[in-house]
Amino acid sequence: MKKGVAMAEGCKWADKSPILQEYHDLEWGHPVVDSLELFEKLCLQCISAGSFKSGENNEFDIDSGQLSVIEARGLYREKFHNFDPNEMVKLTQKDIEQLVDEEKERQQKDSDSSFKGLCKNKQKLKALITNASAYLEMEKNGENFSDFCWSFTKNKMILGGTNLKDIPSYATEMSVELKKKGFSYTTPSVCYAFMQSVGIINDHSIDCPLRNDCIEEANIFGK
């Protein structure tokens, strides 16, 4: 699938904007096995604290929280040291308060812009530091974050693509285990959205051309 190619069929939520189309084509549902990349994507889901939802005719949709985070990912990477846990844990409460104050000031000066920028919820931003600390503790204990994330589906991509009436048990199990390890803002719905985004669950619609592309990529990784 070429960058920016609009699809006549498939995941309709991607048609909402060029940013979503690119995110859908190049990232969403493509299997991720790198631990640090998985950590970044989990952090971004924690910020949006939302999930893809079932819209009309049980088709997938995306909420405004996720859209704003996707749009602002470059800014999050800048402010949170490219989601390097070793650097993130150095951030303090004062740093978070400064980030929020700067964001409020930016939005006031640029009130006509549709760009929402950073989340101003201090607790969510502090949770990223908490999660970085938990990630490093896992690493210290010899636990591989990628192995952990994929373990809930027995190291295999799960095929979805129907509807989201029920949160699968593996997302709930991940949420429970992440909480035990000290992670924050990792509810079952956040975990499910995370699993969708990194290809642990392939929720591209049945008629989406990328559904099979992601399956083929998973096969390459042994997933």
Image (spheres, rainbow, N blue to C red):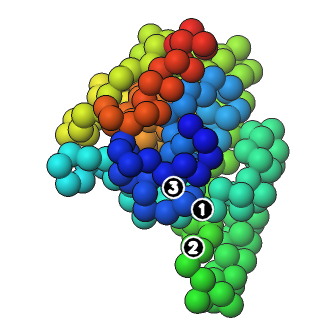
Residue contact between numbered discs 3 and 1, judged by CB atoms under 8 Å: no
Q: Position of residue 125 (x, y in %)?
A: 61, 58
Numbered tag placed on residue 71 in the rendering:
1
Answer with mark 2 or mark 3, whichever residue precedes in sequence. 3
The amino acid marked with disc number 3 is Leu
Q: Position of residue 83 (x, y in %)?
A: 73, 45
Q: Residues within 10 Å of mark 1 (few under 14, many from 20)?
A: some
Q: Secondary structure at mark 2?
A: loop
Q: CA distance from mark 2 to mark 1?
A: 8 Å
Residue contact between numbered discs 2 and 3, judged by CB atoms under 8 Å: no
- Position of residue 51 in the picture relative to residue 103 (left or right): left
Q: Quadrant of the N terminus?
A: top right
Q: Position of residue 64 (x, y in %)?
A: 43, 64
The amino acid marked with disc number 2 is Lys
Judge depth for marks 3 and 1 and give the one in front.
3
Q: Residue at x 63, y 62 (%)?
A: 72
Residue contact between numbered discs 2 and 1, judged by CB atoms under 8 Å: yes
* Residue 144 visible from this viewpoint: yes
Q: Secondary structure at mark 1?
A: helix
Numbered tag placed on residue 116 in the rendering:
2
Q: Residue at x 69, y 85 (%)?
A: 105
Q: Which residue is mark 3?
A: 20
Comparing 155 with 181, the one in front is 155
Judge depth for marks 2 and 1 and give the one in front.
1
Q: Residues within 10 Å of mark 3 (few under 14, many from 20)?
A: many
Q: Residue at x 49, y 51 (%)?
A: 6
Q: Position of residue 138 (x, y in %)?
A: 66, 23
Answer with mark 3 or mark 1, whichever residue precedes in sequence. 3
Comparing 120 with 35, the one in front is 35
In this rendering, the answer to whether 70 lies above or below 29 is below
In this rendering, the answer to whether 90 lies above or below 176 is below
Judge depth for marks 2 and 3 and give the one in front.
3
